Amino acid sequence: MKLKKVLGSFAWVILAAALILINAAAANAEEFSIQEQYAVKETVR
């Protein structure tokens, strides 16, 4: 019973870490996209 509780807690920690990493990757991709848009606008001028 105790082992199941520990494994369940560990699973929640892994899930939280995965969500944080996914969120960080998405924010990084969005920032890169914004930089690319500015680079294209500067090239067009």
Image (cartoon, grey):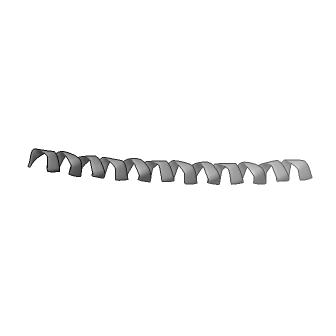
Which of 32/1 is in front? 32
Residue at point 85%, 48% (across, down): 4
Report whether residue 1 is seen. no
- How many numbered marks are there? 0
Judge left or right: residue 7 versus residue 13: right
Judge left or right: residue 16 versus residue 29: right
Residue at point 65%, 49% (across, down): 15
Find residue 14 and report its horizontal and vertical position in percent.
Answer: 69, 49
Find residue 32 and report its horizontal and vertical position in percent.
Answer: 35, 48
Judge left or right: residue 9 versus residue 14: right
Find residue 36 and report its horizontal and vertical position in percent.
Answer: 27, 46
Which of 18/5 is in front? 18
Residue at point 63%, 52% (across, down): 17
Report whether residue 8 is seen. yes
Residue at point 29%, 52% (across, down): 34
Judge left or right: residue 1 versus residue 16: right
Which of 26/42 is in front? 42
